[in-house]
Image: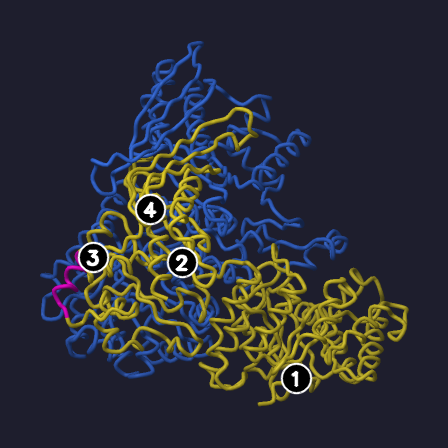
Chain colours: A blue, B yellow
C-alpha cells in the first residue's frame, strides 16, 4: 500500500495538536508519539516547526537519528519566506531545509485581509513569497505541500486571489494544497462546494484541514473527501487549539469502515484504541470516554435492558464490531479488560494463557478489580508483566523486603526562590539476607525515596547502578475531589539498553510513587536475572 | 415565536442524556435542569419515562406542581403498548396518559429484526401496537410524536416495513416521526438521502434523533434539516449513551448563526454558555473544554503570534463573535506571549497597561522568565492577576507571613493495601498579627499541608472556611531527569460562587503545590476584601 500515493493520511498531532490549551510536549514525548503514529500506519507525521522554536529543531535532529519509521514520512511545518527576502537567504527557510524532513508543509496566507493585516505586505509580494519558497525547497529536493491558511474565509472574501495562491504554489512545484478551515466555522455542504470549485477551476490536488468549532470537523473532512480531496489532516484524540482539530481516527475509521476506502495498511486500524489511549498517556490529557470509536464508553451498553437480544445478535445494538478499531463491547460499568485482550497481551509478553480458562478468568478479574481502583496497564507493561508472573507462578517476583519508609519535606529559608524545600527519605529493608537502613536526600520526596531505595538495594544487587529513572508522570483521577483524589503515577526506568513503565495508585501521591518505584526496580532485577 | 410550530427544538437531556455512563440525576436535579432548558428556550423537554421507573413518575408529578415553564412543553417518553393487550388496558400506557405531560413521545420499533428478536412479536402486531397506542393517547387529548427506533438500520434492512410504521403512526394521529439513528452509525449524506425519501414517499413530518458514534451527530442532524426535517432532538453537552447524543447547543447555534434560521426565542442563544455550564454543575460531569461554542477553550487563542492582528480585528481569528453564545474570547498567555497579548489580557482583568510601555515590557519579561522556568498562565488566571498586581502596585498582595512548613509521609503497616501511608504537615505562620503553629493530617502530603494552612489562616480570616480546593493537577515537565524534573501544579479553589486557578512550579512537587495553595488563598482573600 502506497501511503504516500493516491491518498494521504496526514497527522499533525505534534504540531497543530500541540497548540491545545494546557498541552505541552517534550522532545522525548514527541518521539514517543511519532512511533505510535507510525504504528497506526499514517502516511505523514508533521513533527513541528523547526527554526521557530528550539524544541522542534531538536525534535527533527533526534528524529533523524532515533526514529526508524516503518510507514510514515516526516513533514516539517513552516511559513513562507519573509517579505522582501530571498527564500535562499531566509534563516527560517534554512531551518526547514536543514531539518532533514523529506516533506515540508508550507503555510501560506490565502486570505487577502490576512496578507494585509497580519503579514503587512502586498498581495503580490505574498504570491512571490509562495512561489519563491516552494521553488527553493523543491529545488533542494524536498516535497512541498501547501497549507492554505484561512482558505475558506479567504475564498469567501476574495475567491480569485485565494485560487491564485494555490495556482502559484502548484506552478512552483507544490504537490498538495491543503485547504485550511483555520477558524473552524465551516459546515459540510460549504466545504464540499469549495473543494469542488477548487478542483474544477485549478486542477490542483486538494487536501483538507478542519477544526471543530461547529462540531463538524469530521463531517467536513468527509465532505471534502467526497468532493475529491485526497489528503486528510487531523490529530489523534482531536487535540488542537480552541475546539480542536478533526479527530484523525474518527476520519480514518469512517473512511475504512463506513465508506469502504482503504487508507491505512491492512489491519492497523485495529490498533487505533490502544494508540489513542497510549498517546493520551503521553500528553497527560485524560481521554474522553465518549470519543467516537476509541472511547471507553463508545461500545458500552447498559446491558440490563437489551441483554438477551444482545446475546442473540450484538450487532442489533452496535453500529460496527468494536474489534475493528481495537475497542471492546462492554456490558457492565467499569473495566476495559476482556479475556481476549488479556490473552493477547499475555501472548505479547511470552505467556500462553489460552490453555487455562480458569487462570485467564482469574487474571481478568484481578485486572478489572485493579482498574476499578484506578490502575491502568495500557502503558504500564512492566507492572502488567509482574502481575501476570504473580498469577501464573503464584507469587509476585521479589528481591527485597521493605519494613517501613518515611519522607520529610521541609523549607530551609536560606535557599533560593522556588528551591526552598528539601526532602529526606529513610528506607528500612532487607535484601540478599542483609538488613539496610538508608537515608537519601533529594530535591523532592520521590527523588529522595528513589535515592534511598536504590542505595539500599544496590548494596545487594550492584546492577541497580545501571538503572535510571527517566520519566515520571502524575495524573489526578477522579478530578473534583481536590487533594483527596486518587493519584496515579507512571514511572519509566531504563537500564541503558531498554526501558519499562510501572504504575502506582493511591490517595497519597508519595505512596503511589513508591509502588511504581518498587515495581520498576523489581522488574529490572527480574529482567537482569533472566538475561 | 411559536416554539411548538413549524420548527421544534426538542431536548432529551433528562431521558436519553441520562443514559450516559456515570450520570445519575435525582428528581430535584431534573427539575433544576428543566428550568435551565426552559431558560434556553427549547420547545420541548423530554422529562423521562413515567411508569418505567418511580423517579420519572415522580418527576412528572412534581413538574406539574412546581415547574412554571415560559417556553417549553413537557414530553413524556414511553413505548408502544405490549403485544396482545389493548392500549387502554396497558398500565404502562396509563402511566403516560396520567403523567400530565401535554406531549407523549412514543418509541416504536421500525426495524423488522428488532420486532422479531427484541419484541418477539410479528410485524403485523407491531403495526397494530403503533396504531392502537397512538390513537388511544391522541383520543385522550395528548399530542403524540413517534420515535422510530433503529430507523436507519431498519430502512436498510426492510425499507417498505420501516415506512409502513411511520404511515401507520400518522394515520392514527401522530404529528412528528423522529427518525432515530439509535446505533449511531450514520453519515450525513446517508441521513439526507433517507430523510428525502421518507418525506417524498410518505409525506409525514420528519424529526431527527442522532448519536455521535461516527463523530457526525451534529452534521447528521443538520443534513436532516437541510433535507426537510423540522424537528431536531439532542441533549445539552451531548450527554448520552456510548458516544452521546447530538449536542443540542451546537445544532441550534449552527442553525441560528451559520444557517440563519431562527429556532429559539430572540436573544436566548446568548445564554447557551451559562446554561451548558450550569447543567454540567448539576450533572457533575466536568465540562469538556474543547466543546464547540460553549467550551472554555472554544474561543481561546495562543496570542503571541497574532496578537497585533487580533487587536486590529479579532474576527480575523474567530469564526463568530463569542458573545453570540455567551462565551468570551480568551487570550492565553503562553511562552509565545508578546506585549500586545499581555496588554489585552490585562485589560480583560481590569488593568489598563496601554499607557505605560515600560511597565508592559517589565511584565512581559517577568512572564517570559517565569514561563521559561515552567510556569504557565494559560490556565492560571488567578496567579497571573496576582503577578499583575505585584508589578503594577510594587508588592504582591499578602495576608499572612509563612516562617516554615514541614510534611512527613510515612508507612503505617497496619493499614490496607494501597492505603499504608499517612501524611502530617506542620505550618508556622503569622496572620493578622498573631503567630500560629498548626499541624494537619491528610491522606496525602498536599492534603495535609492544605489542612494545616487553612486551619492557621482561618483563625485570622474566618472567610477562608468558605474556600474549597476543588481541583488539583500535577504535571511533570520533562527535562529527562526522572524524579528530579520540574513539577508544575495547578490548583482550583472555589468560594461557592466562583472558582480560580493558581500555579506553582519547582523541583519539589510538595513545594510547587505549596506555592499554588498559598496563591489560591491569597487570591481568594484579596477578592473577598475587594468585594
Q: With respect to residue A320, does B31 lie above or below?
A: below
Q: Where does label 3 land, which residue?
A: A52
User: Is any part of residue A96 visible from this angle?
Assistant: no
Q: Which residues are magenta?
A: B356-365
Closer to the camera: disc 4 or disc 3?
4
- Residue B199 - label: 1
Q: Nearer the viewer, residue B334 or B246?
A: B334
Q: Residues within 10 Å of mark 4 (few under 14, many from 20)?
A: many
Q: CA distance from mark 1 to mark 4?
A: 57 Å
Q: Residues within 10 Å of mark 3 (few under 14, many from 20)?
A: some
Which label's residue is closer to the chain start, 1 or 4? 1
Q: Nearer the viewer, residue B274 or B374?
A: B274
Q: CA distance from mark 3 to mark 1?
A: 55 Å
Q: Position of residue A293 (x, y in %)?
A: 54, 56
Q: Residues within 10 Å of mark 2 (few under 14, many from 20)?
A: many
Q: Where does label 4 land, which residue?
A: B488
Magenta part, dominant SS: helix
Location of residue A14 by image quarter: bottom left
**Do tag 3 and tag 2 residues touch (Cβ < 8 Å)?**
no
| Furthest residue in direction bottom, as rendered | B1
Q: Where does label 2 land, which residue?
A: A239
The residue tagged with tag 2: helix, strand or loop?
loop
Amino acid at each position: 500500500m502506497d501511503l504516500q500515493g493516491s491518498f494521504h493520511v496526514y497527522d499533525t498531532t505534534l504540531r497543530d495538536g500541540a497548540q491545545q490549551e494546557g498541552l505541552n510536549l517534550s522532545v522525548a514525548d514527541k518521539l514517543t508519539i511519532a512511533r505510535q503514529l507510525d504504528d497506526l500506519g499514517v502516511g505523514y507525521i508533521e513533527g513541528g516547526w523547526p527554526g521557530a522554536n528550539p524544541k522542534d529543531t531538536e525534535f527533527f535532529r533526534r528524529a533523524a537519528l532515533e526514529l526508524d519509521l516503518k510507514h510514515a514520512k516526516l513533514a516539517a511545518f513552516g511559513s513562507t519566506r519573509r517579505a522582501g527576502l530571498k527564500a535562499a537567504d531566509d534563516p527560517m527557510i534554512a531551518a526547514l531545509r536543514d531539518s532533514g524532513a523529506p516533506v515540508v508543509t508550507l503555510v501560506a496566507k490565502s486570505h487577502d485581509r490576512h496578507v494585509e493585516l497580519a503579514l503587512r505586505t502586498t498581495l503580490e509580494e505574498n504570491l512571490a513569497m509562495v512561489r519563491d519558497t516552494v521553488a527553493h525547497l523543491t529545488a533542494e529536493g524536498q516535497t512541498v505541500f501547501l497549507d492554505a491558511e484561512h482558505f475558506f474565509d479567504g475564498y469567501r472574501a476574495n475567491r480569485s486571489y485565494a485560487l491564485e495562491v494555490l495556482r502559484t504554489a502548484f506552478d512552483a512545484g507544490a504537490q498538495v494544497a491543503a485547504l485550511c478551515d483555520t477558524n473552524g466555522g465551516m459546515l459540510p455542504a460549504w466545504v464540499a462546494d469549495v473543494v469542488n470549485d477548487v478542483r474544477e477551476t485549478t486542477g490542483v490536488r486538494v487536501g483538507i484541514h478542519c477544526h471543530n468549532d461547529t462540531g463538524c470537523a469530521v463531517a467536513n473532512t468527509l465532505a471534502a473527501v467526497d468532493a475529491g480531496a485526497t489528503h486528510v489532516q487531523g490529530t489523534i484524540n482531536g487535540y488542537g487549539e480552541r475546539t480542536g482539530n478533526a479527530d484523525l481516527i474518527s476520519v480514518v475509521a469512517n473512511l475504512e469502515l463506513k465508506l469502504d476506502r482503504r487508507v491505512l495498511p491492512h489491519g492497523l486500524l485495529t490498533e487505533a484504541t490502544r494508540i489513542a489511549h497510549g498517546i493520551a498517556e503521553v500528553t497527560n490529557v485524560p481521554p474522553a470516554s465518549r470519543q467516537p470509536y476509541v472511547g471507553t464508553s463508545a461500545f458500552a451498553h447498559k446491558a440490563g435492558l437489551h441483554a438477551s437480544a444482545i446475546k442473540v445478535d450484538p450487532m442489533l445494538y452496535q453500529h460496527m464490531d468494536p474489534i475493528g478499531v481495537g475497542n471492546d463491547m462492554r456490558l457492565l460499568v467499569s473495566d476495559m479488560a476482556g479475556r481476549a485482550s488479556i490473552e493477547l497481551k499475555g501472548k505479547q509478553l511470552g505467556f500462553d494463557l489460552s490453555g487455562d480458562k480458569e487462570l485467564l478468568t482469574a487474571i481478568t478479574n484481578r485486572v478489572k478489580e485493579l482498574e476499578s481502583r484506578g490502575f491502568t496497564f495500557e502503558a504500564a507493561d512492566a507492572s502488567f508483566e509482574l502481575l501476570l508472573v504473580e498469577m501464573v507462578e503464584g507469587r509476585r517476583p521479589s528481591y527485597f523486603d521493605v519494613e517501613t519508609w518515611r519522607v520529610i519535606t521541609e523549607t530551609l529559608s536560606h535557599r533560593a526562590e522556588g528551591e526552598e524545600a528539601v526532602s529526606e527519605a529513610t528506607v528500612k529493608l532487607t535484601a540478599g539476607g542483609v538488613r539496610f537502613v538508608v537515608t537519601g536526600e533529594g530535591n523532592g520526596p520521590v527523588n529522595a525515596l528513589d535515592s534511598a531505595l536504590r542505595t539500599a538495594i544496590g548494596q545487594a544487587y550492584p546492577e541497580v547502578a545501571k538503572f535510571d529513572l527517566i520519566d515520571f508522570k502524575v495524573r489526578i483521577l477522579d478530578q473534583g475531589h481536590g487533594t483527596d483524589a486518587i493519584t496515579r503515577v507512571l514511572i519509566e526506568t531504563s537500564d541503558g539498553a531498554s526501558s519499562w513503565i510501572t504504575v502506582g495508585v493511591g490517595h497519597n501521591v508519595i505512596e503511589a510513587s513508591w509502588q511504581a518505584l518498587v515495581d520498576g526496580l523489581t522488574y529490572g532485577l527480574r529482567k537482569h536475572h533472566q538475561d
